[in-house]
Image: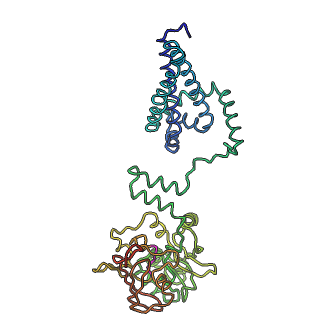
Amino acid sequence: MNDLPLGALFGALVFLLILSACFSGSETALMTLNRYRLRHLAEDGNPGARLAERLLSKPDRLIGLILLGNNFVNILASSLATIIAIRLGGEGAIPLAAGLLTLVILVFSEVAPKTLAALHPERLAFPASWVYTPLLRVTFPLVWLVNLMANAVLRLLGIYPEDAEGNALSREELRTVVNEAGAMIPKRHQKMLVNILDLENVTVDDIMVPRNELDGVDLDNPVDVILEQLEQTPYTRLLVYRGSIDNIVGFLHARRVMQAQLDGELDRTALEGLIREPYYVPKGTPLNRQLLNFQRKRRRTGLVVDEYGDVQGLVTMADLLEEIVGEFATDPADSIADVLPQDDGSFLVDGSASLRELIKTMHWDLPTDGPKTFNGMIVEHLESLPETGTSLMVSGYPIDVVQTQDNAVKTARIRPAERRTPDDSG
């Protein structure tokens, strides 16, 4: 070393600092790569992405290789700086050289390259993968030995590298990713994706048509009466029963009935032959599971039954899909037929209106841990059947009972603009 000119020593020192910057930057770049984007690029055939994904599949080996090279380079640079300091100023210059080298490494070989790598990881990670892949093969025995000792130390501390969790995202993490997608995913599409994730938290009870609102065809009626009902109905599939809703026979497709009538083959026997047996859905079934059940059974309509087999309501594929794509009405009040806006800012709400629909569409902060309908919420709050003119306050919303019928609230008025919150005085 004493025979080498100072120019060569300075050149070697600069080269080692550049190598140190490459090791530091590539380490940060590889470790900050978006693993899902990396997988996508690898599947699209990007060679750099494929090499990077292969290296990151064994992160302990990759880190061992990078740190081995980086530490070797930094120690060698420190030795060269010491030699240069002695030749320029003697042993007294060594502390100064050590301080200057530390500053240079910190700025030019650590902070600057790592910041650049964090901002543009792919630009550095993919080219580095072409270097690290053959280098890892050459130095594998040494890297394996270093990893063996490092893992042994971790096991002494109760940490087992082989038990490390994978990169799979939880439902909540995936929701965060979707919400933070920004302009990459349109807002409406973000909402649809989040709605899909939320299907697990919603059951068929929340979207079903309740039993008291079910309508259908009574087979005990004459055929002419049944045909007239089918011609006037806005639905494609109708519930069929005998005598009462408690004796359900199945579902009838209105279009098939009309086709049989046009062919002149319709009588009571032919009509009953077109009935399809009912499909039952257990009460409390999550919507994500019911969506798969509809697909597997190739059905579009199901009857929700409780543990005793009694029909509680009806759920359709259309209602389920609305939970994903949302309502089609542009005016929130128009999207719920049971809500009528008034000139004074209040709303007349039908007692049978679904609380969940009111919350989702009207954005009212009503309780959801009890009854499913507006009438049920009022009755539970009062703990008695209310009379017309009764006023109450639910979650800060003033509510007036406008009309009662058959031991239930038929219509009530809610005043969202006059809502009181806990922070309001008086």
Quarter occupied by residue 327: bottom left
Range of magenta residues: 352-356
Q: Nearer the viewer, residue 299 or 105?
A: 105
Q: Nearer the viewer, residue 423 or 125?
A: 423
Quarter occupied by residue 58: top right
The image shows residue 171 at horizontal and vertical percentages of 54, 57
Asked if residue 354 lies in the magenta stretch, the reply is yes
Instruction: Say if 405 sits above or below 250 in the image.
Output: below
The image shows residue 126 at horizontal and vertical percentages of 50, 33
Q: Quadrant of the C terminus?
A: bottom left
Instruction: Say if 182 sits above or below 346 in the image.
Output: above
Residue at x 33% of width, y 80% of height: 346
Residue at x 62% of width, y 34% of height: 61
Residue 215 visible (yes or no): no
The image shows residue 238 at horizontal and vertical percentages of 48, 78
Q: Quadrant of the N terminus?
A: top right
Asked if residue 140 lies in the magenta stretch, the reply is no
Instruction: Say if 371 sits above or below 178 in the image.
Output: below
Instruction: Say if 293 sits above or below 244 in the image.
Output: above
Residue at x 38% of width, y 72% of height: 362
Q: Residue furthest front?
A: 92
Q: Nearer the viewer, residue 194 or 323?
A: 194
Residue at x 49% of width, y 22% of height: 96
